[in-house]
Image (spheres, helix red, strand yellow):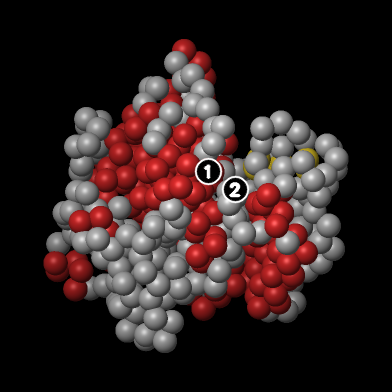
Amino acid sequence: MKYESATLIVALIGLASAAPTPVAKNTFTTFSIPRAMRRGLQAREVPQEQSHNKFLAGVRTSLALDNPAGITDPVFGLLGNAAAAEGAGTITNLDCLHQATADQAFTNAKAANDIPGMTDALLYAALERNTGKVGLKSVLCTDKAVNPEIQAIQQHQDPASDGAAATNKAIVLELAQQIAAVGGDPQDALLSGTFAPGDLNDNTGAGNTCDTADDAEGCIFTQNLLVEDATAAEITAAVAGTAAPAVGADAGAVAGNATADACVSAAPVVSAAPVATNTASASAPAATQAAGNASAGDAATGDAAVGNNVQTFTGALGGAAPAVINSGGARPFSVNGATFVNSGAALQRSCAVQNNACANAVNSGALNGSVGDCNAQEKACNAAAA
């Protein structure tokens, strides 16, 4: 996604004092931004934060049940940091507002044994965030989510960005596994997809997006703009053997303040950098965590002795890549508390976390060099894992 302006938020701020009330599933509430407000937007690229409105509506309903962080609305989590700050409530790491919103909504839905609500939260967590231009990746959240289901998901990346096709496919396949695990329809994961790639040389920033506030379904669906990242057969293969657990009496055990506990930083948190430096922090999402990814490492779930660190990359610009520990079990590989089915996905998470820490250090002045050096290191790290 490519667009951010604090002006966009003015029409929404008044809603902060009155939390929305829960509504029946499939009854959608949307925001209508006055034309006068839109005239004030400084164009970079067509915004798209309301393109998947039906999932925002589901998250809005679940979030209204318990919103201790005071997040104004789920739409803020899909905006760039400058605009997101206006609706972040007490969330201070704006790179993680998207995740924190999904996390709290999932917690509330799980406590209510609400499978559609949990599914909406997972789908929302996978939606692409706005960035400053065509082809620019959004920054990876390095805070640990309360819910492992949300922790396993990262947002789609701009389809024109480097490696986006493989990255977004892996995100969708992992998302399908998580949806299946909570009892939802794994094929719904395909609905989290984004648009056709825009032109990197298009200085108008027109892109191939849409953003219709009063389209309850979501304009990406009603205008047939969705580009699916995988096939139905690939989804079926990815979720083979994934069983939905019982979510009855014990479901309420995780209820409570998910967002309050969600921000356990795995990398330095710095203020949002200008758009020019955001390119640096934007790393390939760590959620390339699905079976079916082309990486050779993705096929292996038992390729290292239990208890061993399978991360062999030795580059240490900005710090070493986090360990990838094989602990056995259904999701045996872990990186900073996040668990993965496949070693290849876990190794990519490790490389991405290292890249974020490196870029943050460069942008804050704590590390000499350029963000390009960090990105080159990430490529080498991923190559070592292949």
Question: In the rendered image of this protein, does residue 191 appear above or below residue 7?
Answer: above
Q: Kindly give the residue lying farthest to the front in the view shown.
A: 233
Question: In the rendered image of this protein, does residue 283 appear above or below residue 27?
Answer: below
- Circle 2 sits in a helix, a strand or a loop, which is it? loop
Amino acid type at circle 1 is: Ala
Q: Which residue in the protein does label 1 denote?
A: 237
Image quadrant assignment for residue 366: bottom right
Residue drawn 38% across and 76% down? 198
Q: Which residue in the protein does label 2 denote?
A: 291
- For the image, the number of numbered tags is 2
Q: Quadrant of the C terminus?
A: bottom right
Q: Is residue 328 left or right of residue 103?
A: right
Residue 7 drawn at (x, y percent): 28, 66
The residue carrying pointer 2 sits among few (fewer than 14), some (14 to 19) or many (20 or more) residues within 10 Å by Cα, namely: many
Residue 320 drawn at (x, y percent): 80, 59
Amino acid type at circle 2 is: Ala
Q: Quadrant of the N terminus?
A: bottom left
Q: Is residue 267 left or right of residue 197?
A: right
Question: In the rendered image of this protein, does residue 1 appear above or below residue 51?
Answer: below
Q: Kindly give the residue lying farthest to the left in the view shown.
A: 35
Could you say which is closer to the camera, residue 215 or residue 3? 215
Residue 116 drawn at (x, y percent): 34, 32
Tell me whether the residue at label 1 lies in contact with that at label 2, contact meaning CB atoms closer than 8 angstroms. yes
Could you say which is closer to the camera, residue 251 or residue 254? 251
Residue drawn 27% across and 46% down? 54
Could you say which is closer to the camera, residue 310 or residue 112? 310
Q: Kindly give the residue lying farthest to the top in the view shown.
A: 249
Residues at marks 1 and 2, CA–CA distance in whole angstroms: 8 Å
Sequence-wise, the earlier of marks 1 and 2 is: 1
